[in-house]
Amino acid sequence: MERISGGSPTILPSQRRRRRFALAGLAPLVLWQLVFFVVPLLILLVISFWTMRNYRLEPGFSLENYRAVFADPALWRSLVLSLETAFFVTLACALLGYPVAYFIAKKAGRFRIVLLIAVIAPFWISIVMRISAWRILLGENGVINQALISLGLTSEPLGGLLYSPVSTAIGLVYAYLPLYVLPLYAAIDRIQDSWIDAAKDLNAGPVRAFLEVTLPLSLPGLVVGAVFCFIFGLGEFVTPALLGGGKQLLIAQIIQDEFQRRQDWPGGAAIAMVLLAIVFTLLLLSMRYLRIASGERP
């Protein structure tokens, strides 16, 4: 790039060609997102303002669906339960994922690639198959109950393992733990060992070096992993349906019920838009934090 007599920068032809190639490479992805993400969301947004009469959609503009969302106590209880579940799952993934990510990044040595593949491998199997396996483990006649009985820790099967909030939380932590480990690994791997050694040279013990060097520098990975786990956990449908037994409905199950059983598309679309607004707010806040953490102006 050249500057002519103090004026604006001049873009060279080679730079123009590179930009055109970059835009051409992004075009299929942008088109895919427009057709299969943006357009369906816009359609859902439009439908959320329509009304439903005699099981038929009537176009128009009405805020009644949104008033019903904010006025329904049962819906708010479901939303609060979803938020609590997503928060617990995120916290559990952070506590379990940090040691795993730290070990892979700093202690695994030549086994690092093998362990990373082991973390990614569950994504090669359908989520339905993986969560269904937990039903075999947590059932009254499942592996866990049989092991507890064999060890003499209980005289009869524990009935609260399956079809309960406990089983839902276990399934969600299992499903999204890799999404926390991977960004954490990337953040910890960028921390130079020499920085930790410098802290130790200044009489900082291992705990203080971790708290003042490793943990602050790995916060971006913690934030990204938390966003992944919280957002996916907030909108999860498969795991609560298979492991929760329908005893406590999360917000995604309410939305599915509106669309399928009640055939109330505008009502379901309004709930989905409220949930989407919460998700976008969390994304914007996390992006703002990451910009500040990287030294950029908010």
Image: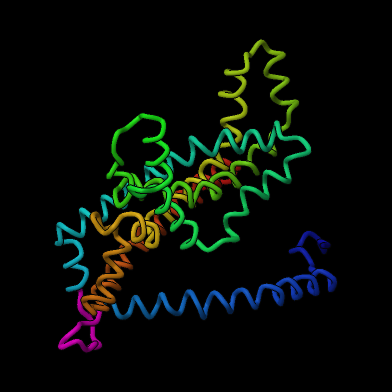
Image quadrant containing the N terminus: bottom right
Quadrant housing residue 44: bottom left
* Front residue of this view, candidates 78 and 244: 244
Taking the magenta stretch, the answer to whether it contains residue 93 is no
Q: Residue at horizontal 35%, vertical 55%?
A: 243
Taking the magenta stretch, the answer to whether it contains residue 54 is yes
Residue 198 image offset from top left, x and y in percent: 72, 20
Look at the picture and state if 29 lies above or below 277: below
* Front residue of this view, candidates 9 and 147: 147
Look at the picture and state if 12 lies above or below 275: below
8 relative position to 205: left or right: right
Quadrant housing residue 92: top left
- In this rendering, the count of numbered labels is 0
* Front residue of this view, candidates 179 and 282: 179
Q: Residue at horizontal 71%, vertical 35%?
A: 108
Q: Residue at horizontal 61%, vertical 47%?
A: 182
Residue 239 image offset from top left, x and y in percent: 39, 57
78 relative position to 280: left or right: left
Q: Residue at horizontal 26%, vertical 70%?
A: 257
Give the main secondary structure of the magenta stretch: loop
What segment is highlighted magenta in the picture? 49-63
Residue 49 image offset from top left, x and y in percent: 25, 78
